Amino acid sequence: MATYEAEAGPIVVADPSERTSARLTRALAKVPLNLFLAFIALLWLMPTLGLFFTSLLSPSDYITNGWWRIFSKPSLATFENYSNVWNTTDIPTSLRITAEIAIGGTILPIMAAALAGYAFAWIDFPGRDILFVIVIALLVVPLQMALIPVFHLYNTLHLYDTIFGLILFHTAFGLPFAIFLLRNFFIGIPKDILESARIDGASEIRIFLRLILPLGLPAIASLAIFQFLWTWNDLLVALVMARNTTPITVDIFSQLRQFGSNIDIIAPASFMSMLIPLVVFFSFQRYFVQGLLAGSVK
Amino acid sequence: MEPPVAAAPPSGEPGLLRRNAVAIAFLAPAAILLGVMIIYPTVYTFIRSFFGKDAHEGFLPRGDFAGIDNYKSLFTTDILVTAIKNSAIWILVAPAAVTAFGLVFAVLTERIAWGVGFKAIVFMPMAISLFATGVIWHVMYIKDPNQGAVNAAIGAVKSWVSPAGALSTASPSTANLTGTPQRGYTLHKPIPAGGTALLGLTAIPPEDVPSGAKQAATPQPKPGAITGVVWRDFKPGGGVPGKVEPQELGLPGVKVSLIDAGGKSVQSASTGDDGSFTFDDVSGSGFNVRISKETFAAPFGGISWLGSRLITPAVIIAYIWVWAGFAMVVIGAGLAAISREVLEAARTDGATEWQVFRRVTVPMLAPVLSVVFITMLINVLKVFDIVISIAPGSTQSDAAVIAVQMWRQSFGGVNDFGLGSAIAVFLFLLVIPILLLNVRRFRREV
């Protein structure tokens, strides 16, 4: 990713006296720009910090103080809300459910999509292009189109309000993008490698497991991060397909209906729900960006 | 991109079959899932949209056929029309704004040393769920400037430009002083240079008396000046109106102005802790003294971002906050691919930075910009979580967009699956042009 690496400036050899003054002028010229961007960065950080500081205020302090008062009076900060949420609400359970949905909803679509992506990229079969066009068409189908029938289907099949039902829904709606991304990546794998394996008599499944999967790892990694964040952060699907087996977003949403009176639960719970995605994001930022660039169509 | 080629040529009928069997095996899991969970439901929803609320659900809907009634109510029911209008605002504003922010950030970050850090900060909201973003901004938008950061910031700027007045309300203590808080109070007793002005006010609630108020001081005449006092002309157990007495407090921070015989304001001053003020360098006579209306300027009470009028712009701002980072990163990658030489050549030819940006950078980025714009367009149509988490219950209907109403009509209490299906189909029709565009792009690639 070119943009994420420091760019090496051109090496300029000039006489030292000119260089110092020119550099100084150039540095000074950039002061307003740096200040402006620092201001923007602050602006972008503030909302998240605001929620974090809000989560540190006790309910009585929250009513009389804006969160920014914590800067001038750090003694206002307390982790009591967090221990309350952890010990007295269902939030830990719903965090666990969220994790299960996100992990299942990441692994399943990647497995199915890797198989299909390989077929689309490297196995010749009649109607391949038409099938792939269907996949591309499915990329933009809004999931609202499936909510009502799948809701009835789940009721019939007893998948309503189950973790597996939610995983299945995320798997299906993650598939078109996953197939699209992986097919495009697999197709770039050099043909010679595959051909020599086939001449050596390797079966398709062996080629898939021993060659394609290892070589496709970068794409699979970006996809995994994407799909993980997407399922972890989902609200709509869980709102429709579950009642008691709910992820953390739905839990916070039901608290939200009485906003104001229970900010001491909502703020820390929201922050807890953000923690894992933020860790994933900062650890794998590079893959995340690659995934974005590979398929900004969804 | 190289077209894929089957490595080993199929050797006769059985080989071809076997090869297809392999393809089927590889495709089966995905095909079954897509068929059962997306393709069949899409067809079902389309058919369901022509049936009423009471139709039987089954493999296909039965009974209570409604024709196009659901589509009629989609365009005639008030809350649904509001949702369509809101979605139109979203479509017109959000994708363009996100792309513009992304472009500006991408171009500017290239010129600073800490571009990587800046990008990480602006990009971070992408990792947070739109739902949590809603919670974050709900807290930001609270109306009370003591709690909502947005209003606190606006209030801080506003009180710097035009500070809140020292008092919220007051009445004159004597008939000499006339007017209203909205226009100010004027002392209708002409005063010559060297004279004094007594401006007594009553009906000030005790908690309203500015902090730091001291015992009022009777003004001492001063040659070539007009002196005076503004004070709370009231003491427990009564007193003489119009006379400064012990236990009566001066009112600090009151804005007073000096009006000449022609009715023009010639000087202004602010009272001290004991309520006293002085206009120096005054000559002649026939002056009036006025307590100006700024004294009674109401403090900033906060803009109601979450109220029915501003809720949609407020949610769009939060949405831009999330997606600007996406646009910046994608456009930034496009920018890195532009040849530096072209830009340098333009600069060498004497083009200003603005000209380079407008005539070289933007046209060269056009393909990337359109990808970002279209991605955002699809995204905006489906926007849901952020709307229902920012808007409080009272303004949910004012903020609702198509996707929100689809959920509300189908699952949020109304349970009208016919109408819900019609809304979903409407949403689907809106993305069809984009779908065709994607397919065409692929066809050109092959």
Image (tube, rainbow, N blue to C red):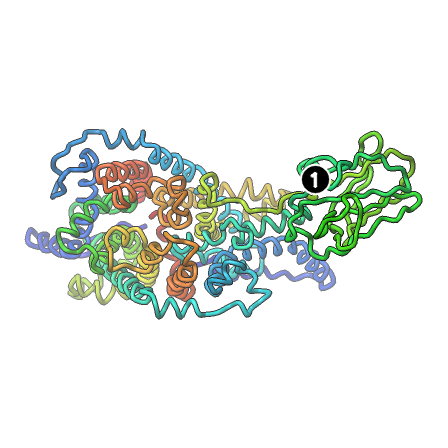
Can you see residue A134?
yes
Name the residue nearer the viewer: B370 or A165: A165
- Residue at 11% x, 43% y: name it: B59
Amino acid type of the residue that numbered disc 1 sits on in the rendered structure:
Lys
Q: Quick one: A189 or B64, which is closer to the camera? A: B64
- Relative to B1, is B20 on the left or the right? left
> Can you give x and y, in whole percent of width and height, for residue A40 in the image?
56, 53
Nearer to the camera, B24 or B318: B318
**In this image, A1 relative to A197: left or right?**
right
Residue A27, image x, y percentages: 66, 58
The quadrant in which residue A182 appears is bottom left
In the rendered image, the residue lying farthest to the right is B223
Query: x, y (%) of residue B92?
Result: 43, 37
Secondary structure at numbered mark 1: helix
Across and down, in percent, residue A285 comes to 42, 62
Residue drawn at (43%, 55%) of the image = A260
Residue furthest toward the front?
B237
Q: Quadrant of residue A134?
A: top left
Mark 1: few/some/many CA within 10 Å (<14, 14-19, 20+): some
Q: Residue furthest left?
A: B14
Image point (17%, 54%), residue name: B27
**A42 to the left or right of A103:** right
Is B70 placed above or below B129 here?
A: above
